[in-house]
Amino acid sequence: MTIHDHPGKERIDAVRAFNRFYTRQIGVLDEGWLKSTFSLTEARVLYELAHRDGLVASDLVRDLGLDPGYVSRLLKKFEERGLVEREATEADARRASIALTPAGREAFAPLNQDSHDQVRALLDRLAPVDQDRLVKAMRIVQGLLGDRPEPKVPYILRPLQVGDIGWVTRRQGMLYAQEYGWDETYEALVAEILAAFVKSYDPKWERGWIAEREGDVVGSVFVVRKSDQVAKLRLLYVEPSARGLGIGKRLVEECIGFARARGYKTLTLWTNDILTAARHIYQAASFKLIEEEPHHSFGKDLVGQNWDLEL
């Protein structure tokens, strides 16, 4: 198989095109980084030394993905220019910590300022809303490629906001198509349910929760009034990227707590047996399977199930 026949060639070409575009935007191909005497890698090493204490050569090798021999030669060059100094660590006399000298910090300061100004100029070309879109897209890239630390708060639950209805409808339609092959009629059903929820919303008896992680919607659930005695749990979903954090369980617990506080006697729901992860959450919360029936919906033969929780 040649590179032209590779099934992922379009994606690979897109990533390579982005790399070429962005390196041109920030001047990576220039002989000196930001018109300085330092290469991009040298500037990055200076940045690490300026912002972290107690670094040793192996830290730079590991964290920057550099060749040990290259790091050794680079540090020696910096020492000869009086930019860094080494001192044996207390834990291991054979390992020397590396720190910038006053001359090193003086050399780094204009690099840091020029980099700041370069990015500011890049952002100033965009409207504030597009700046937010750009930063969000960059965070997504970092997250997908594994270079972003876990957030201190895994997720938050918040009330419904403008824009959530369209987002939840689109994401549920896409996810169930990807994971179960359901057609567009499911997305249409979600749109109908949520449109009705908004139009007839009664905050005393009904509620919606949105799970958010670092600004991204990653899950949702709704409680709607079916009668004075019965509430219905609807449209529970969690994004694949946020599964394993207990969000689905928490969303169901919020529904149960709300229904009890409002005096409902029963919390009911309808699902399909193919949605095993959701069914496990309902079972763990003491919902009981009341009935099930085969049906053909969303382009698939399914088994619908009704579950009730006596409150």
Image (cartoon, rainbow, N blue to C red):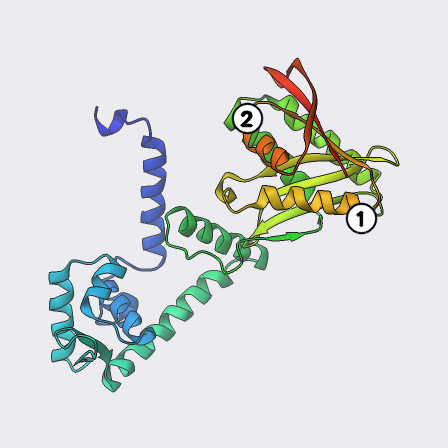
Q: Position of residue 20 (x, y in %)?
A: 31, 48
Q: Position of residue 118 (x, y in %)?
A: 40, 66
Residue 163 seen from this side? no
On the rendered structure, is 113 left or right of 227? left
Q: Which residue is mark 2?
A: 177
Question: Element at badge 1?
Answer: helix
Residue lying at the far right of the rendered structure? 228
* Quadrant in which the C terminus appears: top right
Q: Amino acid at mark 1?
A: Ala
Q: Position of residue 226 (x, y in %)?
A: 83, 32
Q: Which mark is residue 221?
A: none
Residue drawn at the location 33% of the way across and 79% of the way down: 109
Say above or below: 94 vs 17: below
On the rendered structure, is 160 left or right of 299? right
On the rendered structure, is 144 left or right of 86? right
Q: How much space separates mark 2 and mark 1, taking CA atoms?
A: 36 Å
- Crowding at dot 2, Cα within 10 Å, few <14 / some 14-19 / many 20+, comes out as some
Q: Position of residue 184 (x, y in %)?
A: 62, 23
Between 102 and 144, which is closer to the camera in this rendering?
144
Residue drawn at the location 53% of the way across and 52% of the way down: 133
Say above or below: 282 vs 52: above
Question: Element at badge 2?
Answer: helix
Q: Earlier in the sequence, mark 2 or mark 1?
A: 2
Q: Which residue is mark 1?
A: 261
Indicate which label's residue lies in the foreground, 2 or 1: 1
